[in-house]
Structure formats: structure tokens, C-alpha cells
Amino acid sequence: MKNNRTNSAIDQAIRIYETPAGPLFVAARHGRIKKCFTRDTAIRYLAFFMTTQAFGMSGFKQRHPQVRIDRDDMEIWRDGETTAEYLSAHQRCMRRLRRILARKRAMQKWHERWESMHDRYVKDVAALQASKPAGMN
């Protein structure tokens, strides 16, 4: 059974696979997949996927228009740079993802402490009930 307090959509978007070379992080969202060796890179790609999808659905421009360049008497079209709005949205998305993951780690640590305290409490109650004198209700 999955615990909803600790299992999130980010866990589904960033999967961790153990390999002989070390952990492999796979970021998958909106039909795009990227395999990474570090968690930070996987978070960065996940933020790219999410920001690109949001900008595409909203109609905002992700890039400036293409630029024509004459190089060696040949006409070359170079893609425009990403817009400042897109870059700031990507940075916000990465910050939010990291903040959500930090809060999730804090919740997991608290939950582990709660479980250990609860287990000790149940064991103490069972021991107390076992040593209960005869004739008490």
C-alpha cells in the first residue's frame, strides 16, 4: 500500500533505478523522458518539461524569433534565444520542486520518529497489560 503522505507526483515523474554504476534518475513528464546520473539534473529536466508544457498551452513565447545569418555566402537561420520570462519560470519551477521535496523529506523523518514512538508505546501498553494483577477490570 502506498502512503499518500510520502508518495507524490514528483516521485512518479522522477524515478530512481539502482544500477551497477550507481543510481540512475529518470525524469519523465508530458511524454518526454531524460535519463540522468544526478538528482539535480533530473529536477532541472523535469522543470524544463513542465515549463515547456505550460508555456506551450498558454501561448507564451518560449524563444525569440529565428535570426538569419550570412556565413560564407550561405544563408543560415539560427533559433532565437530563450526569453527571460521562460528562464525565470524555469527557475521558479525548480525552486518549487526542491521546496516540495524538502518538505516531503521532513515529513518522512517526522513519520519515522512517530512510528518508532508509537511502536514503543504499544509495546509498553502490552507489557503493562500483561503484568496487570488478577481481579482488576
Image: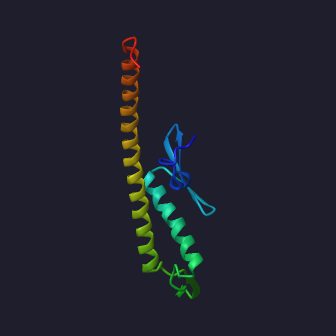
Instruction: Give the camera-side residue of 100 and 28.
Output: 100
Instruction: Give the camera-side residue of 126 and 38.
Output: 126
Residue 128 located left or right of residue 45: left
Residue at the limit of the structure toward the right, as seen here: 31
**What residue appears at the point 37 percent right and 15 percent down from the top-left corner?**
132
Q: Look at the picture and state if 85 lies above or below 24.
A: below
Instruction: Give the camera-side residue of 106 and 25.
Output: 106
**What residue appears at the point 44 percent right and 73 percent down from the top-left corner?**
89
Q: Look at the picture and state if 4 lies above or below 113.
A: below
**Can you say which quadrant of the picture contains the N terminus?**
top right
Residue 124 located left or right of residue 72: left
> In the rendered view, how is the structure colored?
rainbow
Q: Look at the picture and state if 47 lies above or below 68.
A: above
Image coordinates for residue 129, horizontal then vertical, percent? 40, 19
**Can you say which quadrant of the picture contains the C terminus?**
top left
Image coordinates for residue 12, horizontal then vertical, percent? 56, 52
Disc tally is 0
Residue 104 located left or right of residue 80: left
Q: Quadrant of residue 17?
A: top right
Residue 53 located left or right of residue 95: right
Image coordinates for residue 63, horizontal then vertical, percent? 51, 80
**What residue appears at the point 58 percent right and 76 percent down from the top-left corner?**
56
Q: Quadrant of residue 100?
A: bottom left
Instruction: Give the camera-side residue of 125 and 116.
Output: 125
**What residue appears at the point 36 percent right and 48 percent down from the top-left corner?**
106
Image coordinates for residue 21, horizontal then vertical, percent? 50, 40
